[in-house]
Amino acid sequence: MIYSLKNEPFVLYNRLIVIDSNIQNNQTFTEVDISEFYDTEATSTEQQEEGIVILTAKEQELYNQLLPFIEEAAPDRATIIKDRMKNMRHLAAAIAKFPSLLERGNLPGGTRTPQLLIDSLIKHQDKGDTTLQLPSKAILGKAFMVSKIHTFSSLTKLSITVEAPVELTKILQLETITLMFSLMAEDVYLNLIRDESQPMDFRRSWAMSLLLIWEHRNDQTVESVAPVLQTVWDARRKLAPAFGTMMGTSELIMMSMQMDEQWIRFIQAKLEEPEVKQAMEEFLFGISFEQIEFLKKELREKGIAAINRDEVSSFLQEHVKADAGLDYRDFYSMYTIRRDNARARERMKLPGPHKTLEDHFIQYVTALNKEKQSQDTFARE
């Protein structure tokens, strides 16, 4: 018989306590490694260091496919990449020495449990930078993720250099961007957790997802959302919106036709909400809500129907990067600008979006998943 800790959220512990059911009164507790409950083949494809996923099965397969091309065309680069992977393992091993965030721990500051961490994330509504309030493992893990993103970016570039199959290069590029979304997800979850207008069960769910990211550097929600947002970004990059009415209606229609069903449902259900519409405009046009409002007024007063992206900076009388390529750094940089602007508006009670488009989309996906879980539970009953 296997017992889990009571009054704790469901988490995967590295070890379990097995109680010998044959002993009635003085129960004997035996520590058992959880790996004994899994087939060896199921876990051997993932390189893991005490919880942190160094390479997922998919990432390991991509690395294994590319390495022979590098070794043949650029042996010196192969040595550098192997050393980089070794350094990532060393970094993961160092991070693993810090106490787990998913287990009860006795720390110098007192006892810490997953429940207490979740409560702290929900109750502390500080508006400033939270770096010094987060667990050391969260901060160190973020550095690991940045290192991993850069590593896969290098692999993508090397794939082109050594003339690996084009399809392999595309998949490596997508994997790099997916890793970037994992980094971005931390900010999104923190934003949503602090939103007191959200249902408490949603906020607790996001807090638990955040703990799992900090512990394992992997997130199932991000894995499903990332390809959609990547496709939206790609479509947005290719479109040439007319900076006139700033509505972007035709662009949104064209974009939605290329999306999956989940995104189309999101557009249909949420775009009528002013907050979501404003966040979408910021994402689509690549400039802030304030700049969009200024341009609308300027063009209307001057009787100009529309301008293109190249003319935006001159009308605003400041340099703005209204366009960006496929580089993951462009995406993340423009996301952080929208994120910081949204936080500032919320803090100073200013008009405009108080959340990013990514916040709204993950919030919508969470609501859909909760609804599905509820329906599945009802069906089983």
Image: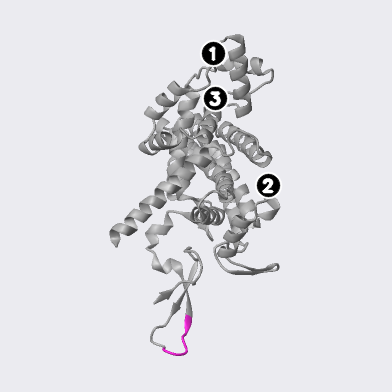
Q: Residues within 10 Å of mark 1 (few under 14, many from 20)?
A: some
Structural distance between the alpha carbons of marks 3 and 2: 27 Å
Closer to us: 176 or 23:
23
Mark 2 vs 1, N-terminal side:
2
Q: Secondary structure at mark 3?
A: helix
Identified by mark 1, the residue type is: Ala
> Outermost residue toward the bottom?
25
Identified by mark 2, the residue type is: Lys
Image spot of residue 346 (x, y percent)? 63, 40
Q: Main secondary structure of the magenta part?
A: loop
| Residue at 59% over, 64% down | 116
Whether residue 60 appears in this view of the structure is: no
Image spot of residue 305 (x, y percent)? 53, 11
Image spot of residue 104 (x, y percent)? 58, 69
Mark 1 vs 3, N-terminal side:
3
Quarter of the image with the N terminus in it: bottom left
Closer to us: 182 or 253:
253
Quarter of the figure with residue 265: top left
Which numbered tag is attached to residue 306?
1
Whether residue 329 appears in this view of the structure is: yes
| Residue at 55% over, 44% down | 188
Residue bearing the label numbered 2: 127
Residue bearing the label numbered 3: 285
Of circles 3 and 2, the one toward us is: 2
- The answer to whether 25 is drawn above or below residue 210 in the figure is below
